[in-house]
Amino acid sequence: MEKSQNNRYVVGITQGDINGIGYEVMFKALSDPASYEDCTFVIYGSPKIAAYHRKLVNLTNIVVNNANGIEDILPNAINIINVCDENTRVDIGNSTIQAGECSLAAIHCAMADIKNNALDILIAAPTSQANMIEAGFKFAGVPEFMAHDLNCRNFVLMFLGGKIRIATVTSPMPLASVPGVLTMEKILWKIRTLNKSLRDDFAIRKPRIAVLGLNPFAGDNGTFGQEEAEKICPAIDKAVEEGIVVFGPYGSDSFFASEAYMKFDAVLTMTYDSAIVPFRIIEGNSGVSYTGGLPIICTAPIHGPAYDIAGKGTADDTSMRNAIYRAVDILSSRKILDGVEPLKRHAELESDKKIC
């Protein structure tokens, strides 16, 4: 099967944790008929588990097509390809090894279709890192696995919101491990990858990037650490020599307190927490996770499986909906860059107007 079949983008969605809110936010986001003007959706999951969730949160009026494979998907329906054992048990609101196994099965099946050039976009529903690791997953997250599986070294994890874009140099890891992983070369290629993504994926001709320090007050001239002088500053200097418009390193406290981020197209932090914490404070739960630098466009809701509200019908689908919209907008930007007329865009997000 070729991508963009029936003049629609083919959007794969991995089911995420079967005991969380993944199915609820997927079905709520896909209940809008306007979504099907541009896209054909296929969930890598389980028709049986999907039916359970639809009934649980009273979303039974949705049209579902049970497809044997990607070649059987239909437009104007939510297609579901089964990746789970028929005896899989849903334990709503709890983390189980079976849930981790189902999450991994969905990711592996979707990646196979990506390698066969069958998907334009991938959306990753919320997973539990703990139960995926228990099921044998050996990566910091889905983006890291995808980059490894696609043999793509130059990727950057980003968080996209209405007021800010934040990227991180290191993947989620124990803080004690960060100094050993953080090198001048790693910081430099993250700056390069972020700059290219801003140009290719967001149509920003000359991106302005702010780089934050690792230590308090960006090291304060070595008082609180040497990483800024030995690793971060040399990477920034090299990037400037290459024509990238990048500034820093800035101390995180004053940078966010003064809203200096509003002057930049993106911010690059050294650690995952130093990116996600301010992002969540600024954007709440409406933001989107995006992996820049991959050949496939992959976005995800910013939240986790939210076991505490699973099955109650109260989950907010805003982040899942935005993950779809953002991905379509990014694909449109890439097609324009390649000289191809994109399909009709879902919606022009106000957030793009504010910070592009």
Image (cartoon, grey):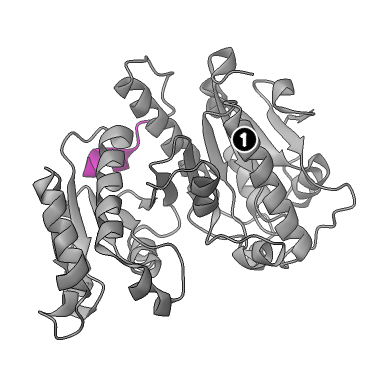
Q: Residue at x 73, y 68 (%)?
A: 94
| Residue 243 visible in the picture | yes
Describe residue 173's horizontal placement relative to residue 197 as left or right. right
Q: Is residue 96 left or right of residue 307?
A: right
Q: Quadrant of residue 279?
A: bottom left
**Which span is picked out in magenta?**
348-356
Q: Main secondary structure of the magenta part?
A: helix
The quarter of the rendered structure image containing the N terminus is: top right
Dividing the picture into quadrants, the one containing residue 340 is: top left
| 48 in magenta | no
Q: Residues within 10 Å of mark 1 (few under 14, many from 20)?
A: some
The number of discs equals: 1
Of 166 and 259, nearer the camera is: 166
Q: Which residue is mark 1?
A: 31
The relative height of residue 29 versus residue 210 in the rendered view (above or below) is above
Residue in view at x 18 percent, y 71 percent: 230
- Viewer-proximal residue, 255 or 149? 149
- Along the line of sight, the residue nearer the viewer: 91 or 168: 168
Residue positioned most to the right: 87
Q: Is residue 318 visible?
A: no
Quadrant, the C terminus: top left
User: Which quarter of the figure has residue 79?
Assistant: top right
Q: Position of residue 87 (x, y in %)?
A: 90, 52
Whether 115 is drawn above or below 2: the answer is below
Nearest the viewer among 302 and 270 is: 270
Which residue is located at x 68 percent, y 56 percent?
17
